[in-house]
């Protein structure tokens, strides 16, 4: 994919989407953002442009499921490829509102594929998740390990991958790269972009930051034996800038790929909730209080992704360490924990 190509980024105002927009703008791509701001803020758009030092090609406030409006966006631009982030992403929330998760994640992806088909767009990078492996004590997980989604969020990602596999099998002109990751954290080093959802976060990293600045009650670190130090909830945490770079690199490999290909995106080792709380406390100089509690419904104990396939094929590995993730996340939250309201 030549770097002057036009890329549509769905969910481009969200956490990973906004960092990916900066990465793409920085590499010369023309970027069109589609987002309904259901879990982000329009303020992110100016932050993206400020950090990148370039304008986005266009920004549309559209719910992907609004097929007519989505199609009109494709009418207005020659889109070369799509990076698809838009969707709902919290395992715990998906257990509470499963129908919404299926509707947004599967319905949104179906609507996007229909609009792409209608407009001759055949290349897609899909934002997937290792959660589709379900509750397994295997680890680190490879792309070939069995998939047994154990909550509606994971099931929605699994269904999307099945759909994409069928489309690619039946329509060989399509190329899809699906990147499965576990837990992106951190923020852009400028402190201007990061994860600051407008609603109460169901996601760990912003919740930890809120505890540190005192705007949230202590978090539960769930340990099977009742101790926080042995806390479960071990996750492969990866810096969001590493995730953004990997999506840009995936775009560069669309032209030499065929069909659906799946790649893990991770560091290959895990950190527990307790370790995240402690590391955040260290960089922020504040104590992050916690309570030992039970796991969230639908959550699994440990999830680490083997990143070898991507390294082998694309020479790509995550470069930022855990300290950088916490330092960058803290910089954002120290400056602005208001969900970009300021
Ligand atoms: N953050 C994680 O821990 C994680 C892990 C694995 C996979 N993923 C996947 O990565 C993607 C991006 O995650 P994120 O952390 O940036 O989430 P996010 O919530 O910050 O970003 C998603 C964006 O999509 C938008 N959106 C939601 N529904 C939409 C719709 N129907 N139409 C248009 N826009 C819509 C939201 O407003 C938001 O800006 C998601 O698909 C998620 O499932 C995230």
Image (cartoon, rainbow, N blue to C red):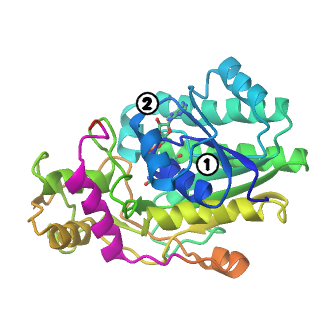
Residue 282 picture quarter? bottom left
So how many labels did they put on this image? 2
- Look at the numbered disc 1 and give the secondary structure of its residue: helix
- The question of residue 86 being in magenta is answered with no
User: How many other residues sit within 10 Å of disc 1, few (<14), some (14-19) or many (≥20)?
Assistant: many
Residue at 9% x, 50% y is 214
Residue 150 coordinates in the image, percent (x, y): 48, 50
Quadrant placement of the N terminus: bottom right
The C terminus lies in which quarter of the figure?
top left
Span highlighted in magenta in the image: 318-340
Labels 1 and 2: the sequence-earlier one: 2
The residue at label 2 has a CB less than 8 Å from ligand 1: yes
In the figure, is residue 93 to the left or right of 338?
right
CA distance separating discs 1 and 2: 22 Å
Q: Position of residue 147 (x, y in %)?
A: 60, 58
Q: What secondary structure is found at the residue carrying circle 2?
A: loop
State the residue in front, 325 or 311. Answer: 325
Picture layout, residue 247 above or below residue 310: above
Residue wearing tag 2: 38
Against 251, residue 35 (above or below) is: above
Query: Circle 2: is it few (<14), some (14-19), or many (20+) Cα within 10 Å?
Result: some
Q: Which residue is at the front of the view, 212 or 54?
A: 54
Q: Which mark is residue 158?
A: 1
Of residues 229 and 315, the one drawn nearer to the viewer in this rendering? 315
Work out which residue is located at the far front of the displayed protein and give it: 53
Whole-percent x and y of residue 337?
A: 23, 46
User: Residue furthest toward the top?
Assistant: 68
- When asked about the image quadrant of residue 135, the answer is bottom left
């Amino acid at each position: 994919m030549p770097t002057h190509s036009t890329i549509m980024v769905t969910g481009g105002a969200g956490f990973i989407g906004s960092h990916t927009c900066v990465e793409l703008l920085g590499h010369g791509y023309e970027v069109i953002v589609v987002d309904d701001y259901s879990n982000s803020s329009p303020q992110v758009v100016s932050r993206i442009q400020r950090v990148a030092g370039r304008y986005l090609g266009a920004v549309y406030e559209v719910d992907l499921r609004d097929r007519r409006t989505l199609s009109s966006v494709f009418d207005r631009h020659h889109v070369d490829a799509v990076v698809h982030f838009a969707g709902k992403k919290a395992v715990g929330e998906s257990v509470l509102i499963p129908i919404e998760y299926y509707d947004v994640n599967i319905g949104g992806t179906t609507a996007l594929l229909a609009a792409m088909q209608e407009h001759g767009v055949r290349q897609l990078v899909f934002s997937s998740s290792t959660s589709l492996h379900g509750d397994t004590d295997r680890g680190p997980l490879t792309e070939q390990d069995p998939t047994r989604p154990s909550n509606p969020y994971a099931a929605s990602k699994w269904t999307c991958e099945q759909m994409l596999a069928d489309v690619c099998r039946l329509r060989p002109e399509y190329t899809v790269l699906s990147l499965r990751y576990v837990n992106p954290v951190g923020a852009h080093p400028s402190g201007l972009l990061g994860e600051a959802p407008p609603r109460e976060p169901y996601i760990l990293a912003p919740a930890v930051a809120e505890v540190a600045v005192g705007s949230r009650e202590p978090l539960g670190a769930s340990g099977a034996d009742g101790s926080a130090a042995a806390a479960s909830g071990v996750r492969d945490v990866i810096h969001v800038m590493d995730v953004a770079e990997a999506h840009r690199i995936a775009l560069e490999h669309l032209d030499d790929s065929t069909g659906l290909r799946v790649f893990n995106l991770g560091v290959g080792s895990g950190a527990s909730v307790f370790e995240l709380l402690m590391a955040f406390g260290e960089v922020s100089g504040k104590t992050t209080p916690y309570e030992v509690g039970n796991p969230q419904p639908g959550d699994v104990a440990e999830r680490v992704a083997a990143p070898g396939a991507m390294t082998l094929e694309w020479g790509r590995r995550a470069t930022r360490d855990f300290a950088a993730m916490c330092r960058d996340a803290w910089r954002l939250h120290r400056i602005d924990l208001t969900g970009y309201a300021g």
